[in-house]
């Protein structure tokens, strides 16, 4: 439950700025290119802090890290509402991203400790479904919030929610499930012996990490997965307003589709994968199949969306592209858990770093391509489709289950 609620909180906190972007652009007198740079500021700091925050979770435990980073990003969410210039807004969103960076690596660390192997992909699917649906309904939520308060006060409101989460988490959670009074003997036996993975693992075998083909390809495919996806949480409101000339409730309703169907994709992957794994002979093949279907479908459907002459068919195609995109999410994160083992926080942080380097590049490249000319949105979408096909080429060569430490056993 804490993983689901934090995933929701993290996506609401990061996605709300895209819905407020038209008001922010107007009030701060920003250009499209400057707004793209502000979107990118979050992504670059998020990327830079992924490995340090994941490594810190492996070392001191996920609980200590999550308490600190959620308080940090909640403070900078609130401060977003106090900014009056491009430079100040850029700095605050940069610092906000640095805090959010540790969320998913440390949640993945928690899954590695709290869950047996057979439950991990499904847990990732549930968490990412929740995150995507949070992102899907955030535009509508922010639209409603902006009806009763200014965009500045809206950021203060969302920051306060993060502080409440920290208080509850601080009281209830334990890094080691066997130390939690609510875990009975049967549950402890089902989880198995994972206490040795909870903390104290700062000595990451970097030589193994950097010499692993599967690790490098995980990084590349996650960059390829994230570059197109960031369009949905940065440029989407502007795309609907400027390219399709949609306003208000109609635009926010359509903006829900990609992230909502992305969440459905995560859920479908979590539901289908156990049966598929049994049919094809194991998790290695089933994860590869789901990922390849996801990348191929996302690229093809994004190209189809460009050909549409009306907003609703285009958004349906984009929504289905996002569905396919998120078929790849649970296999990617489950691979980090299995390959990383007790270093799952660090490995998932490194993969998410690559995703957020793509998150930095995507809005910045988008701003350069668009240059205040909405007619160029198809160019940006063609580039995004091509990047999906690069990800497709990676998965046949990834071993998503063999741990880095396997060599030590031989």
Image (cartoon, grey):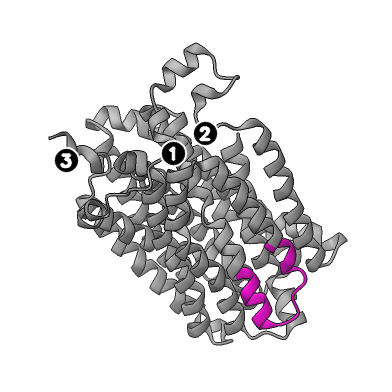
Q: Magenta residues, as a range?
A: 76-93
User: What secondary structure is the stretch in magenta mostly built from?
Assistant: helix
In-image side of 165 versus 68 (left or right): right
- Compared to 31, does 101 lie above or below? above
- Residue 199 numbered tag: 1
Q: Where does label 2 land, which residue?
A: 175
Find disc 3 in the rendering and name its residue. 407
Name the residue located 52 percent from the left edge and 33 percent from the top edge.
Answer: 175
User: Is residue 149 among what the camera can see?
Assistant: yes
Q: In the rendering, at what x and y percent does residue 212 appear?
A: 21, 53
Up/down of 221 relative to 174, above or below: below
Q: Residues within 10 Å of mark 1 (few under 14, many from 20)?
A: many
Q: Quadrant of the N terminus?
A: top right
Reply yes or no: does residue 261 show up in magenta: no
Mark 3 / mark 2, whichever is N-terminal = 2
Residue that extends furthest to the left in the rendered view of this protein: 410
Task: Give how far across and how far down residue 255 sits, in percent.
Answer: 62, 60
From the viewer's perspective, is residue 118 above or below residue 342?
A: above
Residue at 36 percent of width and 63 percent of height = 224
Q: CA distance from mark 3 to mark 1?
A: 22 Å
Whichever of callouts 3 and 1 sits on the residue coming sooner in the sequence is 1
Q: Which mark is residue 92?
A: none
Tell me, yes or no, if residue 135 can be seen here. Answer: no
Tell me whether the residue at label 3 lies in contact with that at label 1, contact meaning CB atoms closer than 8 angstroms.
no
């Amino acid at each position: 439950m804490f993983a689901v609620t934090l995933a929701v909180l993290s996506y609401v906190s990061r996605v709300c700025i895209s819905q407020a972007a038209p008001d922010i652009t107007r009030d701060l007198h920003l250009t499209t290119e400057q707004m793209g740079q502000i979107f990118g500021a979050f992504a670059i700091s998020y990327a830079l802090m992924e490995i340090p925050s994941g490594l810190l979770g492996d070392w001191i435990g996920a609980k200590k890290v999550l308490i600190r980073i959620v308080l940090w990003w909640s403070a900078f969410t609130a401060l977003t509402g106090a900014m009056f210039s491009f430079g100040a807004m850029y700095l605050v969103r940069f610092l906000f991203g640095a805090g959010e960076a540790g969320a998913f690596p440390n949640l993945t660390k928690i899954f590695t400790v709290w869950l047996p192997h057979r439950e991990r992909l499904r847990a990732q699917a549930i968490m990412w479904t929740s995150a995507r649906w949070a992102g899907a309904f955030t535009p509508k939520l922010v639209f409603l919030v902006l009806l009763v308060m200014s965009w500045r006060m809206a950021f203060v409101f969302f920051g306060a929610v993060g502080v409440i989460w920290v208080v509850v988490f601080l009281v209830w959670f334990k890094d080691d499930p066997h130390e939690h009074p609510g875990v009975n003997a049967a549950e402890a036996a089902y989880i198995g012996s994972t206490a040795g993975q909870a903390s104290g693992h700062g000595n990451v075998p970097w030589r193994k990490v950097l010499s692993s083909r599967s690790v490098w390809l995980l990084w590349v495919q996650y960059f390829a997965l994230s570059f197109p996806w960031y369009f949905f949480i940065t440029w989407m409101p502007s795309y609907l307003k400027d390219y399709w000339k949609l306003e208000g409730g109609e635009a926010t309703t359509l903006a829900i589709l990609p992230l909502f169907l992305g969440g459905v994709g995560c859920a479908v992957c979590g539901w289908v994968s156990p049966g598929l794994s049994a049919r094809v002979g194991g998790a290695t093949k089933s994860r590869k199949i789901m990922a390849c279907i996801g990348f191929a479908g996302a690229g093809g459907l994004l190209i189809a969306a460009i050909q549409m002459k009306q907003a609703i068919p285009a958004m349906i195609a984009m929504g289905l592209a996002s569905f396919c995109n998120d078929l790849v999410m649970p296999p990617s994160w489950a691979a980090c858990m299995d390959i990383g083992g007790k270093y799952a926080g660090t490995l998932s942080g490194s993969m998410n770093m690559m995703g957020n380097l793509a998150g930095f590049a995507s809005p910045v490249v988008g701003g350069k391509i668009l240059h205040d000319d909405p007619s160029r949105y198809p160019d940006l979408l063609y580039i995004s489709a091509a990047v999906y096909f690069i990800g497709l080429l990676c998965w046949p060569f990834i071993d998503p289950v063999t741990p880095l430490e396997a060599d030590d056993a031989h």
